[in-house]
Amino acid sequence: MDPEYQGTGFAKKFFNEAYSKLDKTKDIYLDVFSLNVKGINFYKKVGFFETGKKFFDQKYVNDKGEQLEIQEMVLKHN
């Protein structure tokens, strides 16, 4: 996210709007780069937790050509 919008509540409002349209009877999974600490913390704040599953995908590499680790998170339905 653009640093100008960090801390403004924009991401939470966007998430809540998207979440309101999802099927609440099913768990919601997402993948996030392991290096994205701010993103991981945001998802934890809105109820997601890490599943422990981590993997690499050939299409995600940094400028050094190294594959970026991805981790799975889940928001359990009630």
Image (cartoon, rainbow, N blue to C red):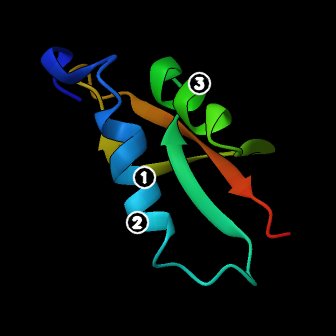
| Residue under the point 25% across and 19% down | 64
Q: Quadrant of residue 11?
A: top left
Judging by the rendered image, the residue that carries numbered circle 3 is: 41
**Residue visible at 46% across and 55% down?**
16
User: Is 22 above or below relative to 12?
Assistant: below
Q: Nearer the viewer, residue 13 or 50?
A: 13
Residue bearing the label numbered 2: 18
Q: Is residue 78 left or right of residue 6?
A: right
- Upstream in the sequence, badge 3 or badge 2? 2
Labels 3 and 1: the sequence-earlier one: 1
Mark 1 = which residue? 15
Whether the residues at callouts 2 and 1 have beta carbons within 8 Å, the answer is yes
Decide: few, some or many residues near mark 3? Use Cα within 10 Å; few <14, some 14-19, many ≥20: few
Residue 54 on image: x %, y %: 69, 43
* C-alpha separation, residue under disc 2 versus residue under disc 1: 5 Å
Of 53 and 73, the residue lying toward us = 73
Give residue 57's position: percent from left, percent from top: 46, 52
Amino acid type indicated by mark 2: Ala
Asked if the residues shown at circle 3 and circle 1 are in contact, with their CB atoms under 8 angstroms apart, the answer is no
- Specify the amino acid type for callout 3: Asn
Callout 3: helix, strand or loop? helix
Residue 28 percent coordinates (x, y): 65, 67
